Amino acid sequence: MEDLLNIVLRSLVVYLFIVAGIRIFGKNQLSQLNAGDVVLLLLISNAVQNAMVGTNSSLEGGLLAAFVLFLTNFLLKKMMFKNPKVKSFLESDPVILIRDGKVLLENLQKVEISLDELEESVREHGVEKIEEVKLSIMEVDGNISVISENETDKQIHYSRIKRRIKKKYH
């Protein structure tokens, strides 16, 4: 029984360490991961496996460690939903990049996006010029939302794209 309790505690500590590490070193959501990040996570998972289960290589030990990880993740998401401070700590707020056709350069620097990347994102949304963008926001999940107004029929177009961010803003 002591061995299984040890697995529970070790798994919990490893989970919290990985969440903190991802937050500190800049990633927030899986939608932001590039190939290097995926490789890093795979290597980390291999590196911490023994830290969670120790010498116990039984099926029960592995399943218990997985259960603790699922449960901890579930509880953390519940805490984030119920407590805005926890959510704010674990997730960054959305950042406005363009407002009424004007680029907010300070915010671009904050999220570490170049003007070229922003212009590319605007074009990918089907908008020719930044001046035509009413609002562009870096969402908490790393997506860039662009709201533009078509001058010919005054319709507002909403679209989103997945963006890979080199380093997540804090």
Image: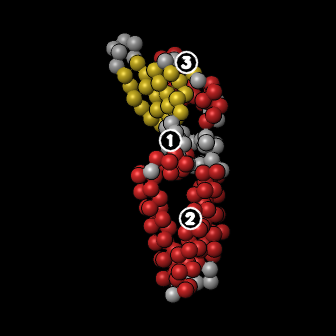
Asked if 167 appears above or below 160 in the picture, the reply is below
Please report contact status of discs 2 and 3: CB closer than 8 Å, yes or no. Answer: no
Asked if residue 126 can be seen in this view, the reply is no
Q: Which quadrant would residue 79 be assigned to in this image? A: bottom left
Residues under labels 1 and 2: Cα distance? Answer: 21 Å
Residue 127 x, y percent position in the rendering: 47, 22
Please report contact status of discs 1 and 2: CB closer than 8 Å, yes or no. Answer: no
Under circle 1, the secondary element is loop
Identified at 57% across, 28% down, the residue is 118
Judging by the rendered image, the residue that carries numbered circle 1 is 140
Under circle 2, the secondary element is helix
Identified at 55% across, 86% down, the residue is 2
Judging by the rendered image, the residue that carries numbered circle 2 is 15
Residue 110 x, y percent position in the rendering: 63, 34
Identified at 62% across, 83% down, the residue is 55
Residues under labels 2 and 3: Cα distance? Answer: 41 Å
Q: Residues within 10 Å of mark 1 (few under 14, many from 20)?
A: some
Q: Point out which mark residue 102 bears.
A: 3
**In-image side of 34 versus 128 (left or right):** right
Task: Give the residue type at disc 1.
Answer: Val
Task: Give the residue type at disc 2.
Answer: Tyr
Point out the tag, 2 or 3, that comes first from the N-terminus: 2
Identified at 61% across, 36% down, the residue is 111
Point out the tag, 3 or 1, that comes first from the N-terminus: 3
Residue 82 x, y percent position in the rendering: 41, 52
Q: Which quadrant would residue 112 be assigned to in this image? A: top right
Q: Relative to the observer, which residue lies in front, 51 or 162?
A: 51
Point out the tag, 1 or 2, that comes first from the N-terminus: 2
